[in-house]
Image: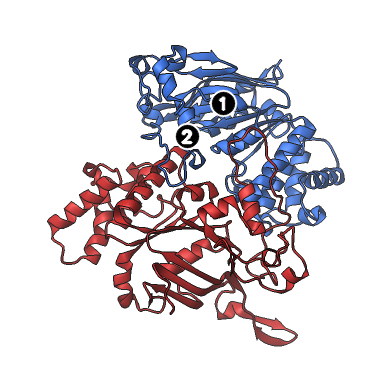
Amino acid sequence: MPLLEVNNLEVCFGLRSGAVKALRDVSFTLQRGERLGVVGESGAGKSVLGFSIINLLSRPGHISSGSVHFEGKDLASLAPEELRSIRGNRISMIFQDPMMTLNPVLTIGVQMVECLLAHRRISKADAKRIALKKLQQVQIPSPEKRLDQYPHELSGGMRQRIVIAIGLLLDPDIIIADEPTTALDVTIQAEIMDLMLNLCEQNNVALILITHDLGVVSQVTQRMLVMYAGRIIEQGPTKEIINDAQHPYTQGLMNALPQMALPGQKLNQIKGTMPPLQRIPKGCSFNPRCEYVMDICKQTLPSFTQSGNCQVACHMVAEPMQDKMLIKEV
Amino acid sequence: MAEQANSLVQIRDLYKRFSISGDLLDQLQFKGGKLTRHREYVHAINGVSLDVMQGEALCVVGESGCGKSTVARTVMGLLSPTAGQIAYRGERIDNLSDKQMLPYRKKMQMIFQNPYASLNPRMTIVETLQEPIKFHNPSMTRGEIQDKIAEVMLSVGVDPSWGERYSHEFSGGQRQRISIARALAVNPEFIVADEPISALDVSIQAQVLNLMMDAQEQRNLTYLFITHDLSVVEHFGTRVAVMYLGSLCELASTKQLFSNPRHPYTQALMSAIPRLEDDRPDYIKLTGEVPTPVNLPSGCVFHGRCPHANERCKQEIPVLTALDDGTQVACHGVEEDRL
């Protein structure tokens, strides 16, 4: 049985102009210890997905249908008290901006101890000992000193290490990391990603890594989901998708990377932009930007087709047209 | 000032520091019964010399806080240098009055990082675009201005019929196109772009980069391109300047730098780029944190994190030296031939 099973999840935001569906029909599973990447552009719904797994959505957002099964419990319909015993405890979340995540007026030690005492019946001294151990795990120099420091006294990379340490405090089963390194410099990003990878492997923690950076996903995760306009359009083993993406959008995303073009040459761009959620086109939501668009794409929503070990929601993959598949090689 | 052939902008021995100790009253401190004045500075740029050649795209890369944006702003005259000189076509421009600076402003334009903050939300696109044209060309007739606006809007791929809309009605990528259009509106020769694509999605980044390369070709532009993203540099840059903590570590042609990086910091930076690869490759691990530019380390600014640092690196500041292949590196290790 998978550790986490998301079925047909739909998330709605009730706005004055009408309900907007930020997630539609999202289904995937996560095994114990597995590292899953979620990629897509801004507005694709990747962060909403992260939030809705532990039902952190606040009004006007809510889960309108579907389920999130974790150890036999449906998190989407769990009572708030029960949910609280899972959030932060069994499933923890790491956010993008470590300055916004940490409370600026409390010392690191207070914030870590507070988190432990909220979930466990232990003494303050014990809680402090655990906090210290976790700070050592994330390789923070002189951890004893850090417990008495405030977030503003630390650099961005150091703060993100603290956030990771807090995420690991209660030995969770799943960590959801929402763009954990986007606010950091490349050399620090490499260090933090390496650290997260090692910690997840050592403690057999499952990781859901939400990011727009295909490079990071390709190096850290085992499986990945590609999202577009609130839907999953392709999912499968990361290796297979990176080496041989099937969906035109995934192909486009990868070809748009500067490393995919010769220096000085034009980059391969995807024309247009992602539609706003209020105005998602009929049929396949990618059809106005797709270079292989067919009549059926404008009419019917594609369902998932199995292709190798990947699942792809694209009519072209469902009914391969040979000449068009050849173009892809270019 | 010595002028190199083809050099459009010359930066000579530039220093910029910012006071962070507030006003006079904040600076006064009681120490041992005496009132003393205590001042602290952020040393943002420490002796940078660079030439931007006519027609090239010179990329300045480095991590946050290395002073790359300060270089951009100082070159544009938005900040005045603490010491050093900046010249445009051999004419010194860093000490000019606002009025004397005017003709240069028309030739030098800037594109900013965040298109959500750099466009006035109360102006329509036409108003945004006509402001610089009117200001720099007071003799232009209304018809000419309109033609010019339509021309630049078309050249950046924004439909001229959208001119009456406000910037909030556009997406990030479209806004950045409009910022580029505003820079192009006065027919500049030289454009300073400060992280122009960092706030955009991958597919939109490609659109904006292509646009900037087209504009360079059609209008014979020279770019000073500030970025932290090395994969963009590899694609876009003619030459690359790598900065660390306010100093230049390495200056080389893009090809040279990517095939044979010499400075240990450049090597670490390059190995940290996340590329599309199956497995996590080995990268050069840097230890420690970037020191603050308030208390600069002695000697080479990188010695605290450098795996190859020795005693000399801790004492003596390395100078930028040209190697046989044209690369310029500021590193004792390279100079001593041990790297």
Marker disc for residue A269: none
Q: Is residue A57 visible?
A: no
- From this viewpoint, which residue is outermost toward the top? A319
Mark 1 neighbour class, 10 Å CA radius: few under 14, some 14 to 19, many 20 or more: many
Q: Circle 1 marks a residue in which chain?
A: A
Where does residue A64 sit, x and y in percent of width and height?
51, 21
Q: Earlier in the sequence, mark 2 or mark 1?
A: 1
On the rendered structure, is B1 left or right of B293? left
Q: Circle 2 marks a residue in which chain?
A: A
Q: Is residue B15 above or below residue B147?
A: below
Where does residue A316 sit, x and y in percent of width and height?
43, 16
On the rendered structure, is A274 left or right of A184? left
Q: Amino acid at mark 2?
A: Asn
Which chain does the red colour mark? Answer: B
Q: Is residue A112 visible?
A: yes
Q: Amino acid at mark 1?
A: Ile
On the rendered structure, is B218 left or right of B224? left
Give the colouring mode of the picture.
by chain
Could you say which quadrant of the image residue A96 lies in?
Answer: top right
| Residue matched to label 1 | A241
- From this viewpoint, which residue is outermost toward the bottom? B34
Marker disc for residue A255: 2
Where does residue B201 sit, x and y in percent of width and height?
46, 40
Given residues B319 and B161, the one toward you in this image is B319
Q: In what element is the residue under mark 1?
A: helix
Q: CA distance from mark 2 to mark 1?
A: 13 Å
Which chain does the blue colour mark? Answer: A
Q: Is residue B210 above or below residue A293?
A: below
Q: In what element is the residue under mark 2?
A: helix
- Quadrant including the C terminus of chain A: top left
Given residues B148 and B267, the one toward you in this image is B267
- Quadrant including the N terminus of chain A: top right
